[in-house]
Image (tube, rainbow, N blue to C red):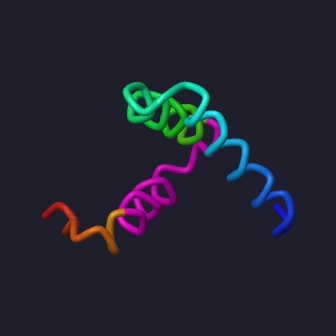
């Protein structure tokens, strides 16, 4: 994915969350994440991405 494609995808993600509204944004993100994990089909990569996404948010890796 190029930088331009990544920007386009992120922009669509943000616009979609805005259109759906804040109350359903967490459900939308959870569903999107599940669909992305299934499409990726690489369990170690998915687990690493979960840890990476949580790292700067004060979360610790499960023991």
Identify the residue shown where x is 57% and y is 36%.
18
Q: Main secondary structure of the magenta part?
A: helix
Query: Can you say whether 35 is above or below 8 in the image?
Result: above
Image quadrant where one finds the C terminus: bottom left
Query: Can you say whether 4 is above or below 27 in the image?
Result: below
Q: Is residue 48 magenta?
A: yes
Q: What stretch is highlighted in magenta?
A: 39-53
Most extreme residue toward the left is 63
Please provide percent x and percent y for residue 55.
33, 72
Identify the image quadrant of residue 19.
Answer: top right
Please provide percent x and percent y for residue 27.
40, 28
Closer to us: 26 or 62: 26
Identify the image quadrant of residue 62.
Answer: bottom left
Image quadrant where one finds the N terminus: bottom right
The answer to whether 17 appears left or right of 59 in the picture is: right
Identify the residue shown where x is 57% and y is 32%.
35
Identify the residue shown where x is 47% and y is 37%.
29
Closer to us: 41 or 61: 61
Query: Can you say whether 61 is above or below 30 in the image?
Result: below
Please provide percent x and percent y for residue 28.
49, 29
């Amino acid at each position: 994915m190029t930088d331009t494609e990544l920007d386009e995808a992120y922009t669509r993600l943000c616009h979609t969350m805005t259109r759906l509204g804040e109350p359903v944004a967490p459900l939308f993100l959870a569903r999107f994440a599940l669909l992305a994990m299934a499409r990726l089909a690489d369990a170690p990569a998915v687990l690493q991405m979960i840890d990476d996404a949580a790292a700067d948010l004060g979360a610790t890796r499960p023991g």
